[in-house]
Amino acid sequence: MITIVTGASGHVGNNLVRRLLSEGRQVHVLIHRNASTFDGLNIEKVRGDVCDVNSLKAAFAGADIVYHLAARVSIETRGWTRFMLSTQ
């Protein structure tokens, strides 16, 4: 069973990945920028961006479970329209 984790390099995602591995799960992580936190772990690193549908389709292919933990944390409002759904 393949488990995908988005936001795996964050605090919650990082701990989840390690927990899943301790349970013997096959883990793939969606990496946007930094993958060094996973050096030495038995995981598959998949480059992608949660704002890019095609990269998500590729990353999620064959997945049984997806934990979506990716988030943008900021006090600035610049760029937030990118995350809003259009009703048009």
Image (tube, rainbow, N blue to C red):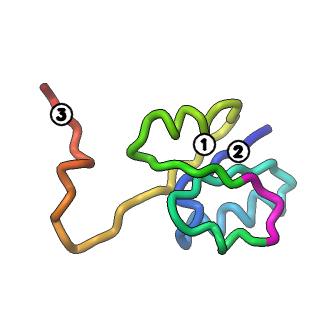
* Mark 1 surroundings within 10 Å by alpha-carbon count, few (fewer than 14), some (14 through 19), many (20 or more): some
On screen, residue 53 versus residue 37, left or right, reads: left
Please tell me whether residue 11 belongs to the stretch shown in magenta: no
Give the residue type at disc 3.
Ser
Give the residue type at disc 1.
Val
Please provide percent x and percent y for residue 21: 80, 59
Lower position in the chain sequence, tag 2 or tag 3: 2
Lower position in the chain sequence, tag 3 or tag 1: 1
Please provide percent x and percent y for residue 58: 59, 35
C-beta proximity under 8 Å, tags 2 and 3: no
Region in magenta: 40-44
Which of the two residues, 54 or 74, is positioned nearer the viewer here? 54
Q: Quadrant of the C terminus?
A: top left
On screen, residue 25 versus residue 53, left or right, reads: right
Disc number placed over residue 86 in the picture, else none: 3
Residue on which the image places disc 2: 3
Residue at the extreme left of the image, as rendered = 88
Mark 3 or mark 1: which is in front?
Answer: 3
Please provide percent x and percent y for residue 19: 74, 64
Which of the two residues, 31 or 8, is positioned nearer the viewer here? 31
Q: Is disc 2 placed on a helix, strand or loop?
A: strand
Q: CA distance from mark 2 to mark 3?
A: 30 Å
Q: Is disc 3 placed on a helix, strand or loop?
A: loop
Q: Quadrant of the N terminus?
A: top right
C-beta proximity under 8 Å, tags 1 and 2: yes
At 26% from the left edge and 48% from the top edge, which residue is drawn?
83
Disc number placed over residue 66 in the picture, else none: 1
Q: Quadrant of residue 80?
A: bottom left
* Mark 3 surroundings within 10 Å by alpha-carbon count, few (fewer than 14), some (14 through 19), many (20 or more): few
